[in-house]
């Protein structure tokens, strides 16, 4: 090897090493310097207009101790909040509040694993655009973080220890997902929320979370959280909410039914497959929307005490269709009264009639409550269960 | 051939300042004189007073009137052979012959050669340097008074290790045998597998003082000729004292000696070497080394195991992928872990992150330092386990298991996840043992870069490695072939191990003049069905 | 920072120059030296926070002005 | 004096084209300006791109074994030819700086907010420079390994994101005004498809030059189809937000969540960006230094790789004031700025060469 070659090799090594090592670790941060924020709550003080952010952060050392002494499970459900820690900070804007975290935290908050954003009802009614903007602008805001509105202040909800999960926010996210999986309330990610916000006509929605009290085994009251409804937004501010029935009606209409149950007076049916379609029809200035629902179900509960016959099955199918229809209509009525297009009828019209849409769009608020909605439900009962006769006849 | 050796010998003598006299004497070939005493004097002078040099004076002939001498090196010759087939015929059998071969000395030596000695290979030489060189390699020389010619008898025989089972390249199916340290044995092992007349062992001697025998193995007609020439050129360029092992040769003839990657393969198994030679490669055998070098080598060879070809194709392909995966894991896993833990925490699924964060709590070292500490600890343990006498190995493993596995975690020096990562890495690195040292180097480089730049650093270094690999050639064959440059047919033995009957041609990058290695369409077919006995 | 650039650039210069001088490739050496010194001056300016003109922005302004997009 | 002794096969050329076209478009999918009609813009842009490819490959086919610099010297004469060559080389150089700038902005925003841009760019540049120094063959081999991996990742990402796809988001088709659509699709043609004009520096080293055009268009088609797929995917997954995000692909992949395990895969996109950007930057750097070496009649292009690379990094660091100006340029100015280089120089050169009946028949055969 000649001297030149050797020199070259040294130079290559230096050229590679020097930038790498001098560059140091600008972005390197150890896990024990981070406070992993699992849930973030947003409240507005109605008097001052100040924003209060509530961080629910994970306390790793506690998780370590609970997992190593796994016997102490009975503490959960009403026990002390040891795996999470709540912090509040107040500022004039979301980022102002975020920046004040440094005043009371020992670790840098880390938002890339946040599971839910909770908006206090008061705050949501004031408009949450500043927060949405911050999340969308910031690379830490992932598109599939769940959004929810709390009946009370978000800071209260985030403090309630919830069931089996050691991290409350994860539990809450799972709860929302479960309720959506069983077609009770919608599961709304940040991306969906932002998309509805962007469409100008479609109203954003989010599930609502409330606290209820339960009597524990030792007679003490235990706080638990439950999903109670669907918040309806107009633009970025909340204007009303749908109850349980209306919420599932909404889900039927926007094709978000996965599994779940339909209860009719004589029986309960388990949904196997459901599909819906919003078909707009534009004639002159009249808009007619047809919601076509196609559903298949299994029978899982029959109170009739009769042997099943084809007639009864047909009756059940009809009853089911009626029930679904009434749910959807309830949601439609409510949305008309709120004048909020939660179903995305506007977008459906846009998709089909893009030229006419230009005129319709500015006056959608006036047009919307006058839309004629027709619900067509096709149901089919597949299975009747493991028994084919009633166990006890009338 | 001999000329070449002599030239080398002279060159060495000339450069040898210690024996100036000798160098003056041997400037030009020195021939034997007819005077035995004189010959022996020169020999004694050159070979010195070494105790293993045996010069046996004797009188031979019917009347015991001819002085002669047998010269050999004790330990290099088969004593039985020398005693019974050289000394005995010379000293006693020759007496019994009443013929009048008597006084004519030149007749005598021809007679000895043709009728007396009962050994196989005998050559005559008139050159004293030739005598010395051959005696040093284990020949036995006979000098007779009045004759300027010496007989060199091949009666080599020394203690060797017996043939043993392969220790490094294990296979469940397939032959067990491996090379040993004797060149002849090794060539015989190959010859027994390939009985093709084209199989050629070309001999060279390398090493100014060691004069180690080297054989280049190839099959005429299958190998591309320029390849052999190139290897010969590179071997001839070597000018060093001694070749102790084949590793010396490897380092002297590599294409890119500064690369992390070895561009010359090695194997201790005759079947592997035979297979590679039959693909159109050359092998190099060195006396004294139980390994053979094979060249050219491509990257993929490191991940092929001999057993791939003995087992059925599906599992072989699967295992080959496992080997790739294991290598990638062994090189990249700690680096990726470090990058994820200190830069990209968002890339871990949340539950995993929480678990890891809990384990990381209270550990004082940054992950990068932790990883480097553990890697070095592991390498120390591995080295200790290797070098330690067998009986102490157990102690090492106990201490290692305790130190790494238990105490470090319990003391809160390293996190449990890091131990899991390192253990996975360590096990993965044993899957492709030939690449283990490479994996260790890459691992430490990547971990250092990852702890400074995260995934970006890892990718940048990987790109540099890739571009380096793409630029490597082994004796003109691109190192990454058949992947890049792409050779679809070559992929049959790269990404999968296709059934043997589909691999009709030799690897294309080797440019073999005889590309076809079997007739196509050999897929086994069941016999055209005769009606089943039971049914008819 | 400036010192870093100096070291880096000096090493960069060390790389090909010996080979070029040995081969007596003067033309290449001049080319290298010109480009290298340009890079050196610019990087020193950068590290001293002297703003260089944003070329792309200028091109963009010119083009959009010309075509009135 | 041969500056480049390597030869690449036509297949390798196609693969390089794929890698090059992917380049920084891995994260900035073409046609974003057309909203959910991006895929139409993409398809139209692909067609225009093929047209442009036809022009410059015809030129390269006319002059086998000649790079654009040598062609220019033949067609326009020594002085004028070299002036035009320098213009073309400036384009390659500037384009390289733009790609580097994209690179730096992405990493600065999404992954390494605290690390100075210069460090990352210098590292990338070092790797590119060392690869360029090893010649076009090595670059082609790297492409052979990297491009299929990228394709695989792009397709896998798309498959994994299928549960989140809502094809309704693509409706109504042709929602944007035609004029805007055409402008955007021309923008799509100029970035990235017609940027393959840089291969005028590479086509000379293809082993079967008569099949060069088909190899280039094949590569363009493959990457074009992937882009159409990506455009459909992004629009269908992200809906209207797809038009707002700077890096929609990166966000679309973040949506993936299969069984709570296969999630947070966006690193794959970032890795794709590094690898494909590596190929694009390397080719542009290669074109620049080779062109410069030919203009100045150097005996080797290797000594000037690093200085040119450093200059490219400096240009990348200074060429725009802020991200907004860059987006402005990418969506408006660039599609016009690129026309003289992508269409003008090859077309005019081709026409003049045809008129002057260059190259003379005998020379080609030799």
Image (tube, coloured by chain):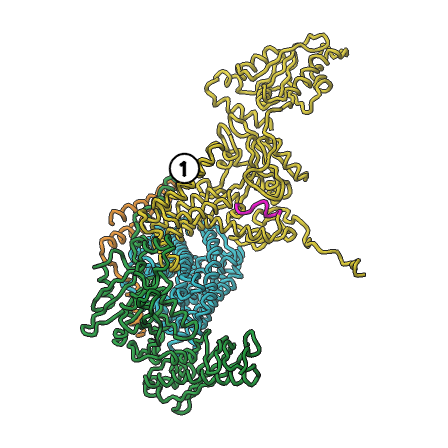
Q: Residue furthest left?
A: A48
Judge whether D184 appears above or below B205 on screen. below
Task: Residue B197: give x, y in percent of width and height.
Answer: 68, 38
Asked if residue D316 shows in the view, the reply is no
The prevailing secondary structure element of the residues shown in magenta is helix
Q: Is residue B231 left or right of residue D103?
A: right
Please name the residue that numbered disc 1 is placed on. Answer: A2
Quarter of the figure that contains the N terminus of chain A: top left
* Tag 1 subunit: A
Range of residues picked out in magenta: B302-310
Decide if residue B119 is on the left or right side of residue A246.
right
Helix, strand or loop for disc 1: loop
* Vertical placement of residue B393 versus C45, above or below: above
**Chain D is which colour?**
cyan
Q: Is residue B306 magenta?
A: yes
Q: Position of residue D209 (x, y in %)?
A: 52, 59
Q: Which residue lies furthest to the bottom in this view?
A: A284
Q: Chain B is drawn in which colour?
A: yellow
Instruction: Specify whether residue B16 is in view.
Output: yes
Residue C2's x, y, as percent? 24, 49
Q: Does the magenta stretch include residue D271?
A: no
Which chain did the renderer colour orange?
Answer: C
Quadrant in which residue C65 is drawn = bottom left
């Amino acid at each position: 090897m000649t001297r030149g070659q050797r020199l070259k090799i040294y130079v290559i090594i230096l050229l590679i090493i020097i930038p790498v090592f001098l560059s140091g670790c600008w972005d390197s941060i150890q896990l024990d310097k981070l406070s992993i924020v699992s849930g973030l709550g947003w409240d507005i003080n109605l008097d001052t207009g100040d924003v209060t952010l509530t961080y629910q952060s994970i306390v790793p050392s506690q998780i370590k101790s609970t997992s190593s002494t796994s016997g102490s499970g009975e503490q959960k459900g009403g026990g002390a909040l040891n795996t999470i820690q709540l912090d509040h900070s107040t500022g004039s804007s979301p980022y102002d509040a975020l920046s004040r975290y440094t005043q009371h935290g020992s670790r840098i908050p880390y938002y890339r694993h946040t599971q839910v954003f909770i908006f206090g009802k008061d705050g949501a009614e004031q408009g949450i655009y500043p927060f949405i903007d911050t999340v969308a602008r910031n690379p830490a805001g992932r598109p599939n973080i769940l959004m929810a509105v709390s009946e009370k202040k978000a800071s209260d909800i985030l403090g309630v220890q919830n069931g089996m999960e050691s991290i409350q926010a994860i539990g809450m996210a799972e709860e929302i997902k479960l309720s959506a999986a069983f077609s009770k309330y919608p599961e709304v990610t940040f991306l969906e929320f932002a998309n509805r916000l962007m469409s100008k006509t479609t109203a954003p929605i989010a599930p609502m979370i409330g606290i209820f009290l339960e009597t524990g085994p030792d007679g003490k009251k235990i706080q638990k959280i439950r999903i109670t409804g669907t918040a309806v937004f107009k633009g970025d501010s909340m204007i009303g909410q749908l109850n349980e029935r209306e919420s599932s009606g909404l889900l039927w209409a926007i094709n978000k039914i996965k599994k779940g149950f339909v209860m009719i007076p004589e029986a309960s049916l388990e949904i196997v497959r459901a599909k819906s379609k919003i078909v707009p029809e534009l004639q002159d200035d009249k808009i007619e929307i047809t919601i076509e629902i196609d559903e298949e179900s299994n029978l899982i509960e029959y109170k009739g005490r009769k042997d099943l016959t084809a007639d009864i099955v047909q009756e059940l199918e009809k009853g089911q269709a009626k029930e679904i229809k009434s749910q959807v209509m309830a949601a439609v009525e409510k949305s008309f009264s709120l004048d909020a297009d939660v179903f995305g009828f506007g977008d459906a019209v846009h998709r089909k009639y893009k030229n006419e849409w230009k005129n319709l769009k500015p006056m959608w608020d006036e047009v919307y409550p006058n839309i004629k909605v027709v619900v067509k439900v096709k149901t089919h009962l597949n299975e009747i269960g493991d028994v084919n006769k009633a166990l006890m006849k009338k | 051939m001999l000329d070449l050796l002599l030239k080398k010998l002279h060159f060495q003598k000339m450069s040898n300042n210690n024996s100036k006299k000798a160098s003056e004497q041997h400037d030009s070939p020195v021939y034997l004189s007819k005077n035995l005493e004189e010959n022996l004097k020169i020999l004694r002078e050159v070979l010195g007073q070494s105790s293993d040099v045996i010069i046996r004076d004797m009188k031979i002939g019917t009347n015991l009137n001819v002085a002669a001498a047998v010269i050999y090196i004790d330990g290099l010759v088969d004593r039985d052979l020398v005693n019974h087939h050289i000394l005995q015929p010379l000293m006693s059998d020759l007496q019994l012959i009443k013929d009048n071969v008597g006084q004519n000395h030149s007749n005598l030596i021809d007679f000895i050669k043709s009728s007396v000695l009962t050994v196989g290979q005998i050559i005559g030489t008139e050159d004293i340097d030739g005598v010395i060189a051959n005696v040093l390699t284990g020949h036995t020389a006979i000098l007779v008074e009045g004759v300027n010619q010496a007989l060199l008898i091949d009666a080599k025989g020394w203690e060797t290790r017996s043939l043993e089972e392969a220790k490094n390249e294990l296979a469940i199916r397939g032959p067990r045998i491996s090379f040993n340290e004797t060149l002849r044995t090794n060539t015989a092992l190959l010859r027994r597998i390939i009985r093709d007349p084209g199989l050629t062992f070309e001999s060279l001697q390398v090493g100014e003082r060691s004069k180690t025998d080297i054989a280049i193995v190839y099959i005429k007609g299958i190998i591309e000729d320029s390849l052999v020439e190139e290897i010969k050129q590179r071997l001839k360029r070597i000018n060093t004292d001694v070749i102790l092992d084949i590793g010396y040769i490897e380092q002297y003839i590599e294409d890119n000696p500064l690369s992390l990657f070895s561009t010359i393969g090695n194997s201790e198994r005759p079947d592997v070497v035979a297979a590679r030679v039959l693909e159109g490669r050359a092998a190099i055998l060195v006396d004294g080394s139980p390994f053979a070098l094979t060249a050219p080598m491509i990257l993929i060879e490191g991940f092929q195991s001999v057993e791939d070809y003995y087992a059925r194709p599906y599992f072989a392909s699967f295992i080959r992928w496992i080997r790739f995966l294991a290598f990638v894991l062994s090189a990249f896993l700690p680096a990726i872990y470090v990058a994820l833990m200190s830069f990209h925490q968002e890339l871990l699924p949340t539950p995993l992150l929480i678990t890891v964060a809990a384990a990381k709590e209270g550990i004082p070292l940054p992950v990068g330092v932790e990883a480097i500490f553990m890697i070095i600890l592991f390498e120390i343990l591995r080295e200790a386990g290797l070098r330690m006498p067998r009986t102490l190995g157990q102690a090492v493993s106990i201490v290692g298991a305790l130190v790494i596995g238990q105490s470090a975690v319990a003391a809160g020096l390293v996190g449990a996840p890091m131990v899991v990562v390192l253990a996975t890495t360590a096990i993965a690195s044993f899957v492709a043992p030939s690449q283990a040292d490479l994996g260790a180097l890459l691992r430490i480089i990547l971990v250092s870069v990852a702890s400074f730049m995260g995934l970006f650093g890892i990718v940048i270094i990987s790109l540099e490695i890739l571009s380096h690999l793409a630029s490597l050639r082994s004796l003109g064959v691109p190192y990454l072939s058949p992947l890049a440059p792409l050779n679809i047919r070559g992929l049959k033995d790269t990404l999968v191990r296709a059934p043997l009957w589909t691999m009709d041609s030799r690897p294309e990058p080797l440019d073999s003049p005889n590309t076809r290695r079997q007739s196509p369409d050999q897929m086994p077919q069941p016999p055209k069905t005769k009606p089943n006995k039971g049914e008819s | 920072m400036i010192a870093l650039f100096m070291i880096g650039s000096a090493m960069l210069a060390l790389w090909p120059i010996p080979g070029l001088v040995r081969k007596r490739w003067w033309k290449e050496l001049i080319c290298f030296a010109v480009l290298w010194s340009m890079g050196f001056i610019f990087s020193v300016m950068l590290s001293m926070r002297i703003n260089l003109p944003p070329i792309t922005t200028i091109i963009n302004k010119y083009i959009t002005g010309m075509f009135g997009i | 004096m041969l500056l480049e002794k390597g030869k690449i096969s036509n297949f390798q050329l196609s693969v390089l084209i794929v890698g090059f076209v992917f380049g920084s478009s891995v994260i900035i999918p073409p046609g974003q300006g057309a909203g959910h009609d991006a895929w139409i813009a993409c398809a139209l842009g692909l067609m225009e791109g093929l047209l442009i490819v036809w022009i410059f490959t015809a030129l390269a086919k006319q002059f086998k074994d000649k790079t654009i610099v040598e062609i220019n010297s033949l067609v326009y004469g020594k002085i004028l030819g070299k002036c035009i060559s320098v213009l073309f080389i400036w384009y390659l150089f500037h384009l390289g700086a733009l790609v580097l700038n994209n690179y730096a902005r992405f990493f600065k925003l999404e992954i390494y907010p605290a690390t100075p841009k210069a460090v990352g760019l210098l590292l990338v540049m070092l790797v590119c420079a060392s690869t360029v120094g090893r010649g076009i063959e090595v670059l082609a081999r790297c492409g052979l390994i990297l491009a299929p991996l990228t394709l695989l990742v792009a397709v896998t990402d798309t498959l994994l994101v299928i549960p989140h796809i809502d094809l309704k988001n693509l409706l109504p088709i042709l929602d944007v005004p035609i004029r805007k659509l055409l402008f955007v699709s021309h923008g799509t043609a100029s970035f990235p498809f017609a940027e393959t004009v840089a291969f005028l520096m590479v086509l000379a080293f293809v082993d079967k030059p008569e099949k060069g055009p088909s190899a280039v268009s094949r590569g363009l088609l493959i990457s074009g189809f992937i882009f159409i797929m990506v455009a459909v995917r992004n629009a269908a997954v992200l809906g209207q937000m797809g038009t707002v995000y700077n890096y929609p692909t990166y966000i679309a992949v973040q949506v993936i969540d299969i069984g709570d395990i296969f999630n947070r895969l966006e690193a794959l996109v970032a890795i794709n960006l590094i690898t494909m950007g590596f190929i694009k930057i390397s080719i542009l750097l290669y074109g620049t230094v080779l062109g410069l070496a030919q203009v100045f009649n150097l005996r080797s292009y290797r000594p000037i790789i690093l200085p040119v690379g450093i200059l490219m990094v400096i240009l990348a660091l200074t060429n725009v004031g802020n991200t907004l100006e860059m987006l402005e340029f990418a969506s408006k100015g660039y599609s016009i700025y690129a026309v003289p280089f992508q269409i003008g120089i090859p077309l005019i050169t081709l026409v003049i060469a045809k008129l002057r009946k260059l190259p003379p028949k005998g020379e080609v055969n030799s």
